[in-house]
Image: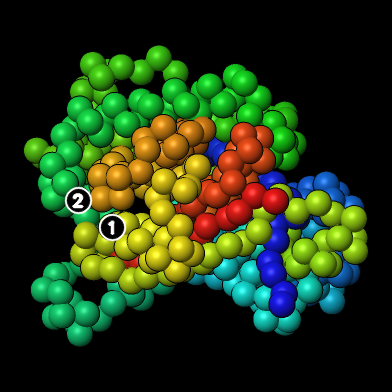
Amino acid sequence: MRDAVIVDAVRTPVGRGKPTGALAGLHPTDLSAHVLTALAERVGLDPVLVDDVIWGCVSQVGAQAGSIGRYSVLAAGWPESVPAVTVDRQCGSSQQAVHQAAAGVVAGQYDIAVAGGVEMMSVVPIGSARAAAGLGEPFGPAVKKRYGVEGFNQGLGAEMIAEEFGLTREQLDQHALDSHARAAAAVDEGRFSGQIAPVTTPNGVVDTDEGIRRGGTLESMAKLKPAFKPDGVIHAGNASQISDGAAALLVTTSEIAARHGWTPIARFHTGTVVGTDPVTMLKGPIAATEKALKRSGLSIDDIGAFEINEAFASVTLAWLAATGADYRRLNPNGGAIALGHPLGGSGARLMTTLLHHMRDQGVRYGLQSMCEGGGMANATILELL
């Protein structure tokens, strides 16, 4: 029986998604090509052997249009015979890309696949695809009638989740401070050095995640104004950062890996996806985790590390409350509040960080999940080899 293993994973540093950001000005296909090239070089992969590249991207418009996965392959100088497909499952796009790569490998459609994703939010701002050519919202009268709303807002959804789980602003702010502190410690201890492929820009080499802030306090956080409700608890300091970044993973079978002399990091153990209420929208990781654990036969205590995307602090703290997971195992190297959230690249970034943490710390099982626009979530369980 065929299995799916991840041989290696690499990511760019995450830059701030603004015109002054460290990676701003680079083309998304070139940033994607950078991690594709770095991945191939790390493992000695001849790109001609790649059966498919599955690439996540959310805002598929402008510089990220036209199936960016394909142009990323060409930008990397890989053979024209290597195909690619671009996936949109909102923020979970590149996590979904890994799921599709693993499924294709297990099914025998692929022997070797590369999965990953990119988002350059400094180049293609969030909401660009929706606003393109003034073509309107991605939902019509039937959806509005079903839910009794004129639109969907993730920030308001995050506020609803905070209210439902009784989360205070102080709790959310402390969680955000913890994210920055954990990420800063990871940088200081060199925990990211093995997973980051430094990027050369016109302004120099970028080798460190740009969004990490040190020295924050509850007092300084309290000065930030709520972003979505005048009396709300969600603000810029306890929400994920707008970012630039890309990541890539090599997926194959254990037999093929051995044939090439590769030592895989982990086995793709379990993958699930769920749909949830699109109004609150962001509770999907709770249901996805439950489904993944049930399917795998594992318990929450069997998992040694969790990467749950910090879209908003209320998302991860609600997930923690619902699952009973150990807070110390949640995003041990910081999350998207500190490191940033380059939409279509985030799923692959989280998985890259999780894989390297599992290998470095000897963690047998790791679980990843992230909320996704429209009310969805993927969950993945990896097993260290």
Residue 353 location, x and y as percent?
A: 59, 42
Q: Which residue is mark 1?
A: 283
Q: Secondary structure at mark 2?
A: helix
Image height of 382 relative to 205, above or below: below
Q: Is residue 73 left or right of residue 129?
A: right
Residue 133 location, x and y as percent?
A: 41, 72
Image height of 160 relative to 375, above or below: above
Give the total of numbered labels: 2
Say few, some or many: other residues with alpha carbon within 10 Å of mark 2 (under 14 / 14 to 19 / 20 or more).
Answer: many
Say few, some or many: other residues with alpha carbon within 10 Å of mark 1 (under 14 / 14 to 19 / 20 or more).
Answer: many
Name the amino acid type tagged 1.
Lys
Q: Which residue is mark 2?
A: 161
Residue 273 location, x and y as percent?
A: 43, 69
Residue 156 location, x and y as percent?
A: 19, 52
* Residue shown at 59% from the left, 46% from the top: 364
The reply to whether dot 1 and dot 2 touch (C-beta < 8 Å) is: yes
Q: Does residue 215 appear in this view?
A: yes
Name the amino acid type tagged 2.
Ile
